[in-house]
Structures are given as structure tokens and as C-alpha cells.
């Protein structure tokens, strides 16, 4: 809910700013956007976040844009291991299990995109090439372990803790491809549905663009 409220707030601010500024012919080629993204991959790497962008209409069909924002990603479960050893004193097997639970990352995506649009039946499908950098600033996950007797399932010992790490300048460059469709909802605003594939991560997005051609 907080993410949705922030998304609407960013859209309101960007639209108000754009309406208050008087642009010349060169400035009118700039456009603004706000979008909400959700990631999912086959490895259950999920995530979501907000992005804002500033773009430039090179021609009616070709645009470039710079975007940044705030994203989270998590994997659940991240790692699980189980083993068994025979214990002479109890004459039973001891089953040991270790689990790294949900692993959360927080990062700032910084992307540069080149987009080419087509006009089809009143909407604008487009294709994108994306270059960028993800700046990670924190990670946390849960770690738990337990030992049990195999025959009786009796618990011998267990432990659980939360591990949190703050990064200092850790990042990763990336590139990818995207596709989407722009749907006009007014003379100045277009609804933007997008798909991106970046370094094995699939991302679905929905947003609004102001002044894009």
C-alpha cells in the first residue's frame, strides 16, 4: 500500500512540475514518467519497486530515457541442506538440517534506454535496448538449523537468527531488452505497459508518461 501511495505521489509531483514549466521548442521534446515494476524469474527471485524517468523525443518514433528509483528483490527459500549421521551413544541417526530463508536485497537501479515506437491501431508498441547499473545498499536473510533423532523425530537442538549486511558501494552493470505498448489516455498522458529482460530477470511494469510523442 505504501508503494502504491508513493507511486501516485511521484506521478502527481512530476505532472505538476511539467505543467508549471514553460518549455521552448527544444524543451518540448522532453517527457517525464513514473512506473511501478515487479520482477519474477524461474529461480523465484521476486521483487518490486518504483521508477521515475526523464526522456527525450528524438523523432516521433525514436526516444531515449534515463530512469532511476528504488527496488527490492527477495528469494524464498534461498538454500536448504539436510544430512544424517549415526550416533553410537543413542544408537540412532541424527538428522541435521540447515536453511537460509528469505533473502532480501534493496538497491537503486540506474538505467539508460533507447526505444523505438510503432503506430498501430491508435496505440504504440515499442522495443527497447537497456543499459544500466544496480547500486545495492543492503541485504538481510534468516538462518536456521536443527537436529533431530530420526526414529522418534525428537528435537535435540535448534537455532534461528536474522543476518543483515549494509553494502558500501557494491553494484552490478547490466544490459537487456524490453518491449511494451503506450496507450493514449489524454493529449499529454499515455499509459505504459512494459516488459524487460535484464540479466536473467523478467520485469513487468505499468506506468504513466507525460509529453511523450
Image (tube, helix red, strand yellow):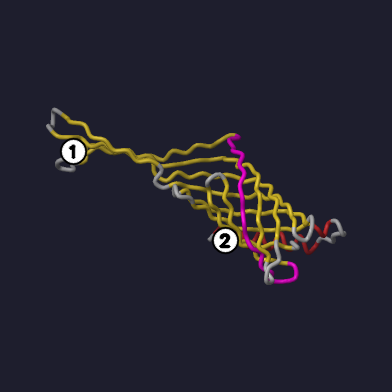
Q: Distance between the Cα atoms at labels 2 and 1? A: 48 Å
Q: Which residue is mark 1?
A: 149
From the viewer's side, name the closer residue of 45 and 107. 45
Look at the image and tell me whether residue 156 can be seen.
yes
Q: First in sequence, mark 2 or 1: give its number.
A: 2
The numbered mark at residue 212 is none
Q: Secondary structure at mark 2?
A: helix
Q: Quadrant of the C terminus?
A: bottom right
With 82 as the anchor, is 192 left or right in this view? right
Q: Does the magenta run of residues contain 70?
A: no
The numbered mark at residue 4 is 2
Look at the image and tell me whether residue 160 can be seen.
no
Compared with 71, 119 (above or below) is below
Local packing at callout 1 (Cα closer than 10 Å; few below 14, some 14-19, many 20+) is many
With 96 as the anchor, is 189 left or right in this view? right
Percent of width and height locating residue 69: 63, 50
From the viewer's side, name the closer residue of 133 and 99. 133
Local packing at callout 2 (Cα closer than 10 Å; few below 14, some 14-19, many 20+) is few
Percent of width and height locating residue 210: 72, 63
Query: Magenta residues: mostly which secondary structure?
Result: strand
Magenta stretch in the rendered image: 169-188
Percent of width and height locating residue 134: 60, 42
With 127 as the anchor, is 18 left or right in this view? right
Amino acid at each position: 500500500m505504501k508503494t502504491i501511495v508513493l507511486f501516485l505521489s511521484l506521478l502527481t509531483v512530476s505532472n505538476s512540475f511539467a505543467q508549471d514549466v514553460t518549455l521552448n521548442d527544444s524543451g518540448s521534446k522532453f517527457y517525464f514518467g513514473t512506473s511501478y515494476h515487479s520482477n519474477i524469474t524461474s529461480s523465484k527471485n521476486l521483487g518490486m519497486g518504483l521508477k521515475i524517468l526523464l526522456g527525450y523525443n528524438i523523432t516521433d518514433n525514436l526516444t531515449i530515457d534515463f530512469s532511476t528509483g528504488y527496488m527490492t528483490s527477495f528469494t524464498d527459500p534461498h538454500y536448504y541442506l539436510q544430512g544424517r549421521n549415526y550416533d553410537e551413544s543413542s544408537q540412532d541417526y541424527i538428522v541435521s538440517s540447515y536453511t537460509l530463508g528469505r533473502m532480501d536485497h534493496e538497491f537503486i537501479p540506474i538505467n539508460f534506454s533507447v526505444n523505438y515506437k510503432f503506430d498501430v491501431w491508435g496505440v504504440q508498441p515499442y522495443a527497447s535496448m537497456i543499459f544500466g547499473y544496480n547500486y545495492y545498499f543492503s541485504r538481510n536473510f534468516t538462518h536456521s538449523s536443527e537436529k533431530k533423532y530420526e526414529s522418534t523425530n525428537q528435537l535435540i537442538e535448534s537455532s534461528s537468527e536474522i543476518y543483515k549486511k549494509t553494502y558500501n558501494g557494491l553494484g552490478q552493470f547490466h544490459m537487456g531488452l524490453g518491449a511494451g505498448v503506450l496507450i493514449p489516455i489524454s493529449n499529454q498522458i499515455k499509459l505504459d505497459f512494459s516488459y524487460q529482460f535484464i540479466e536473467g530477470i523478467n520485469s513487468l511494469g505499468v506506468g504513466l508518461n507525460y509529453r511523450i510523442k
